[in-house]
Image (cartoon, rainbow, N blue to C red):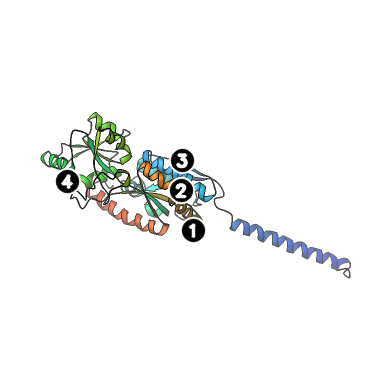
Amino acid sequence: MALIKGGKMKIVKKIGSLIAGISLFAMTISTHAFAKFPEKTVEMTILFGGTAKSVGQLVAKGLEKNLGGTVVPVSRTGGGGAVGYKYIQSRPASGHDIVWNSNSVSTSHYKGKTKFNYKAFEPISAMTTEVPVLAVKSGTFNSVKELAAYVKKNPGKLKVGISGKGSFTHLTSAIVFDALGGKVTYIPYGKGKAPAELLAGRIDAAVQWPGQFRSFHKAGQLKMLAVTSPNRIPSDSNIPTMQELGYKKVDVVMWRGLAAKKGTPKAQIKALEKAAAAYANSSEFKAASKKIGFTINYLNAKDFGKKIAKDDKKIKKLMNKLGLAKK
């Protein structure tokens, strides 16, 4: 370089500057392309209160711990889940907006609450299964057999509480009482709680989550008669299943999991899926499942997608049968 004089030295300097500029530009592009996810806070939309909210908040904390970024649970309730699902659809498909979803993605669609169906979302992972339980006020019916006998002899007289027309509890109740072979009258109790409605005598029976009934059952005020899953649930192992009692067609559970808007990059879905799997296998989540009363049922994105599609067909068929699907 010492032999290069005048103009030649200027050319060498310009070439060096150009190379440095190109290198810096390439590094900028590379850094942007492989930016760490999440780049900002991840908002997890929770669609319902009660057990759904309690477990959803736990999952948000678990994701935050394993994802390496802030995850904030935000309640967006209403419309049987439709409010929350619509919100997710209004957001960019970046992975920074996810939803704690459930079978409600199908029920809200077939009720006409959403124009889109489950295909508008990218499955991330299934996390839990919750099993409904049939309960009555203590001193009214001591068994499912007694309840079935009453329903058959008194068509339409039994008042069954549901959280809303076309809701998951409505569909589950319809399956249960159809199996019992009698007609009943469904009473939506809106924002009220099933235990209070049963104790007040405004309804005669209700199908809800065990957590709502457990303390009243132990106190002898309410009686849990049967769960709707094929197997007994660990948190209430003394309660028989409907199938054990001879009603083989009763097999209803509520799954809950995580999903994002369709079009979310695969890398983001994979990162969320990995964080969810880590929390699903943690001792902390296992302990919570026993305390709250839900079953951990982790499925990866691919298998979760298959389950959602399969359940969607069942829900569509049942809602059409009950006249609950909007034409």
Q: Secondary structure at mark 1?
A: helix
Marks 3 and 2, how far apart at CA: 10 Å
Inter-mark Cα distance, 3 to 4: 40 Å
Report the residue at 40% width, 43% height from top: 55
Mark 4 and mark 2 residues within 8 Å of each other at the beta carbon: no
- State the residue position of label 1: 266
Q: Is residue 166 visible to us here?
A: no
Q: Is residue 144 above or below residue 13?
A: above
The secondary element bearing badge 4 is classed as: helix
Please give the label number shown on residue 180: 4
Question: Residue 100: image x %, image y %?
Answer: 41, 46
- The 10 Å Cα crowd at callout 1, few under 14, some 14 to 19, many 20 or more, is few
Label 3 SS: strand
- Inspect the image, locate mark 2, and give the three-letter code of the amino acid beneath it: Ile
Residue behind mark 3: 74
Q: CA distance from mark 4 to mark 2?
A: 39 Å
Tag 4: residue type? Leu
Mark 4 or mark 2: name the one nearer the start of the chain: 2
Foreground label between 4 and 2: 4
Mark 1 is on which residue type? Lys
Inspect the image, locate mark 3, and give the three-letter code of the amino acid beneath it.
Val
Q: Which mark is residue 98?
A: 2
Q: Residues within 10 Å of mark 4 (few under 14, many from 20)?
A: many
Give the quadrant of the N terminus: bottom right
